[in-house]
Amino acid sequence: MSPAQKLRDLLASPGLLVMPCCFDALSARLIEQAGFSLSFMSGFAVSAARLGAPDTGLISYGEMVDQARAICGAVSIPVLGDGDTGYGNAMNVKRTVRGYAQAGLACVMIEDQVAPKRCGHTRGKQVVPRDEAFTRVQAAVDARDEGAGVLIMARTDARQTHGFDEALTRARAFADLGADIVFLEAPESVEEMRTFCREVRAPTMANMVDHGRTPVLPPAELEAIGYKIAAYPLTLLSVAAAAMREALASLRAGRHPDPRMSFAALQEIVGFPEYYAEEERYAQPPGKG
């Protein structure tokens, strides 16, 4: 079954999909091993992990595709991917969708920010006019229907720049254009979240950014409001960064950090047991032994 079909089946199933976001192959493996049914390759997290740089449009299409290929090669669960603004005009959007699909992603998110874009919960955002936003989504949907097969998530950041009504208008139009999932970034109240889910005729995603603009709600409440997916874009990155800082502080102070995980457990996470099994299988030529 293709990654896109796996995601379609999940979207058709009952209940909220809790989606921790990944930034590399290791974090994706941990998400799958923890029992989650899907993940999202976060642009913020990949920019931080790969470049050590902020999510302000600095990371390129090629770098994101390369990261997606490594992530998708490490797991069997469907992974959604941040396609930013599509990296250019309508033809660039179509190339982005096709390239992300070839890398193994199940869904590509395309947004309506002005390039270079930035994290949706930070300052300085701008969005393109409606017509340009609609053209981007149409191009992405066309690429899907012309053979890419990958699902399309359409995102609007207009809430912060033009107000909730404009964001809702764009979100409704994205669904009408054929987006498989619609994402209104950074609603600022539970009522706005509820209105968005009620008014948009497509599966919707909530972005749970700690200390961001959107209320962080329990999964049960998000499901009751009407969301289909709850994304946690920075949870793993934040926890990992905090743990590494603590370990480095211990080393700097002359103490040995608490490893928190045995060497054996770490080997298991990255796949040494499976590697050893394969190694033993091919230890002798075929037909021998």
Image: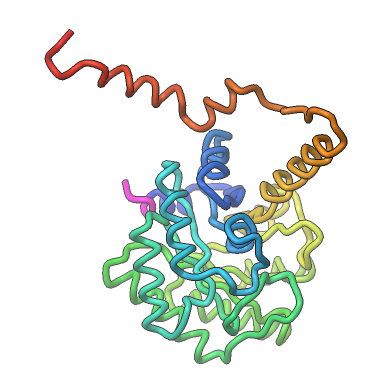
Q: Is 4 inside the magenta-drawn segment? A: yes
**Residue drawn at (43%, 49%) of the image:** 72
Instruction: Using the image as rendered, state which of residue 125 and residue 18 is in the foreground.
Output: 125
**Vertical placement of 2 versus 200: above or below?**
above
Q: Is 184 inside the magenta-drawn segment? A: no
**Residue drawn at (73%, 47%) of the image:** 241
Q: How far across and down, in percent of the image, does residue 15 sit? A: 57, 47
Coloration of the structure image: rainbow
**Vertical placement of 96 versus 8: above or below?**
below
Answer left or right for 214 relative to 157: right
**Vertical placement of 245 versus 148: above or below?**
above
Work out whether residue 3 can be spotted. yes
Residue 141 quadrant: bottom left
Q: How far across and down, in percent of the image, does residue 153 sit? A: 50, 67
Q: Main secondary structure of the magenta part?
A: helix
Q: Residue furthest right?
A: 253
Instruction: Using the image as rendered, state which of residue 277 and residue 12 is in the foreground.
Output: 277
**Vertical placement of 216 versus 25: above or below?**
below
Work out whether residue 16 can be spotted. no
Q: Residue furthest left?
A: 287
Q: Which residues are magenta?
A: 1-5
**Residue drawn at (53%, 26%) of the image:** 267
Answer left or right for 74 relative to 27: left
Q: How far across and down, in percent of the image, does residue 60 sit? A: 50, 70
